[in-house]
Image (cartoon, rainbow, N blue to C red):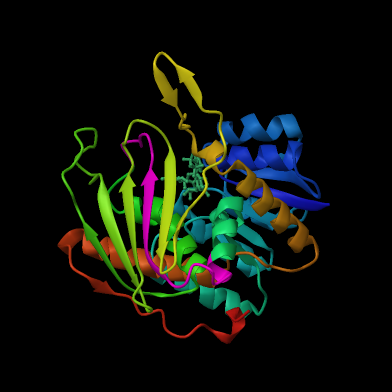
Amino acid sequence: MLRIGVVGCGAIGREHIDRITNKLSGGKVVAVSDVFVEGAHKVGDPIGATVYNNSADLVNDPDVDAIICTTPGFAHKETVMQAIEIGKPVFCEKPLTTTAEDSMDIVEAEIAGGKHLIQVGFMRRYDKGYRQVKEMLESGEFGAPLYLKCTHWNPEVGTNYDTPMAVYDTAIHEIDVLHWLVGDEYESAQIMMPRQTKHTHPDLKDPQLMFLKCRSGLIAMVEVFVNCRFGYDINCQIVCEEGVIDLPSPAVPTYRKSGGLTTPIGHDWKKRFIEAYDTEIQEWINSTRKGEMNGPSAWDGFVANLTADALVASQQTGEVVPIDIGVVPEFYKK
Ligand SMILES: NC(=O)c1ccc[n+]([C@@H]2O[C@H](COP(=O)([O-])OP(=O)(O)OC[C@H]3O[C@@H](n4cnc5c(N)ncnc54)[C@H](O)[C@@H]3O)[C@@H](O)[C@H]2O)c1
Ligand SMILES: O[C@H]1[C@H](O)[C@@H](O)[C@H](O)[C@@H](O)[C@H]1O
């Protein structure tokens, strides 16, 4: 049994605790922590977990074998570095950090420790739909992918969500999954701001149109609109030389009523990728128990943050910003 400590008992922290406790196998949440300690007690007490009000005490608890970090992005580095220091595996929710510089510090610390310890929560790589699309592309039947059109639409966000977060908290999913999907690397990024919705606030530009160009010439266009009101709607269309692939959305019943034919769109990110989260955490538990680390790595987290930094820079100027990933360290070569 993998004894897990969860740092950060907010929305996704509670989701992961619930799936480990009630759905998955091979793991047990034995400790939880949150700066808001009442919140940690609320989820930790019913399952008999030790409750902490800080990350370091949980990471250093001898009864904790591995850590799940589900604090906000700005706080991830603290916990991940503590875990590396003591040599414990850590599953860190996306983004690894909020800047490439901080992610590089983590990469360097992990390499220095000589052991693969970090997995980043890029769960779309575990989604059945994205996996099917990847297989279709790799079959060669569609020829080369030429351009991608994606939407990342959220119904609404809180007032603490600002312009850069549209990149490093939201588009970071597409940043990671798209280059993985097409087997390419980004070389430049650009953002254009269309007319803005009245439903945003002064610190948030919304919507934003993001363009990522790959080395092959492929361009990915990602529309991020986080106050779209109507629902949580993630789509991706890949235009190839020999055909077009649309990412399948999870099947839902459509219905005829009041003179209309309706396909419902959910409101909740937790449900849209629920199976992907289950698979991701189950595979992390399984591989961690075997002393392996197979999922998205700290290097993948760094590459995503480097790309995000270029997009954030373009938010200011609208200009094309180059991306130079450099050479993949030997340590991360598969
Ligand atoms: N993979 C996904 O699809 C997905 C979905 C949702 C959230 N996330 C990621 O998970 C992380 C958490 O998101 P959330 O929606 O659960 O946020 P949240 O605000 O609901 O929860 C964060 C929790 O962390 C606690 N916290 C804040 N600062 C802390 C600190 N310094 N140390 C310890 N605890 C601290 C807060 O009190 C809160 O309980 C973010 O990085 C987010 O991007 C990923
Ligand atoms: O924009 C949100 C994404 O759609 C979700 O999948 C989560 O990652 C959440 O943290 C983001 O704020």
> Is the C terminus in the top left, top right, bottom left or bottom right quadrant?
bottom right
Label count reads: 0
Task: Please provide percent x and percent y for residue 271.
Answer: 56, 37
Residue 219 forms part of the magenta stretch: no
Residue 145 forms part of the magenta stretch: yes
Name the residue rendered at 59%, 58% in the picture.
131
Q: Is residue 173 above or below residue 331?
A: above
Name the residue rendered at 51%, 28% in the picture.
254
Q: Is residue 63 left or right of residue 17?
A: right
Let me know if residue 74 appears in the view: no
Question: Range of the magenta residues?
Answer: 137-160
Q: Nearer the viewer, residue 165 or 318?
A: 318
Q: Nearer the viewer, residue 14 or 243?
A: 243
Q: Nearer the viewer, residue 90 or 22?
A: 22
Quarter holding residue 201 = top left
Let me know if residue 76 appears in the view: yes
Q: Is residue 10 above or below residue 135?
A: above
Task: Please provide percent x and percent y for residue 260.
Answer: 40, 20
Q: Is residue 89 left or right of residue 34?
A: right
